Amino acid sequence: MAKNKFNKSWLQDHLQDPYVKMAQKEGYRARAVYKLSEIDEQDHLIKAGMTVVDLGSAPGSWSQYARNRLTELGKNNPQIESGKPDGTIIAIDILPMEEIADVSFIQGDFREDEGLQALEALLPANSGGKVDLVLSDMAPNLSGVGVADAARMAFLAEIALDFSLVHLKPEGALLIKCFNGSGYSQIVESFKKVFKTVASRKPKASRARSSEIFLLGRNLKLPK
Ligand SMILES: C[S@@+](CC[C@H](N)C(=O)[O-])C[C@H]1O[C@@H](n2cnc3c(N)ncnc32)[C@H](O)[C@@H]1O
């Protein structure tokens, strides 16, 4: 198909997409928010008082969602100022992200020491620098070469897992985006070594034709 024909049909699909329309109506920056919201509704990921790390956060809909949920939960806590979240959100992306109130954002590469250290410096000291929930919607720029793209995706999954091993609380959780193709079963095996429970999720907002799938690990296996 000619390139501009492909772009036209993508644009048409995008404009007709009910999740795009809903995101615009509800003030979210991306339709991706409905992937996280469906998983959160099913798995009750976000709870009051949590420290949440959002890897690959731009344009920001997952951070917006986390902030909205924590603010909703903050209404039950008299110690939380009205309209403020009961919790902490720290986000990182290579790309710039427009400010979101109460979200600390670092523009940096999570694969690089500099980006990682900037993120670690923001982890709240009052919880010993420990985190309750790591979210990763990180995705590499796709080259179209399946094996190379899968390897880049697998690497992002691996470093999100390494970060979680060091920084999650024992009862913490990690949710990552993967491709259900080459390398996926190895990522699942790595998750099973680290977490007591591992589940895959394909939310309705994740297009059926996409090999995208989300992997959720909960409760770290403590060293014996
Ligand atoms: C699908 S988008 C995330 C959408 C976001 N969850 C939202 O709801 O708005 C994937 C993001 O991952 C980011 N990303 C990819 N590799 C990264 C890396 N190594 N470090 C930081 N961000 C990365 C990309 O720049 C991109 O903005």
Image (tube, grey):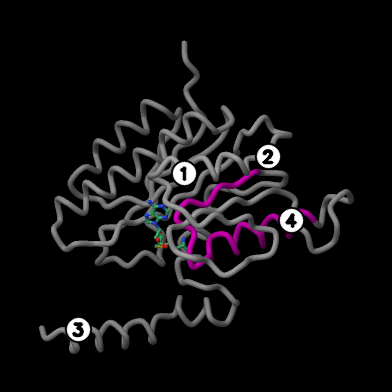
Q: Which residue is mark 2?
A: 124
Q: Tell which tag, 3 or 1, sits nearer the viewer.
A: 1
Q: Which residue is mark 4?
A: 85
Helix, strand or loop at disc 2? loop
Q: Is residue 148 above or below residue 31?
A: above
- x, y (%) of residue 17? 39, 81
Q: CA distance from mark 4 to mark 3?
A: 42 Å
The quarter in which the N terminus is drawn is: bottom left
Q: Which residue is mark 1?
A: 114
Helix, strand or loop at disc 1? helix
Helix, strand or loop at disc 4? loop
- x, y (%) of residue 78? 89, 51
What amino acid is at disc 3? Phe
Residue 197 occupies quadrant: top left
Please tell me how crowded label 4 is: few (under 14), some (14-19), or many (20+) other residues with Cα within 10 Å.
many
Please tell me how crowded label 3 is: few (under 14), some (14-19), or many (20+) other residues with Cα within 10 Å.
few
Q: Which residue is mark 3?
A: 6
Q: Residue at x 29, y 38 (%)?
A: 187
Q: Tell which tag, 2 or 3, sits nearer the viewer.
A: 2
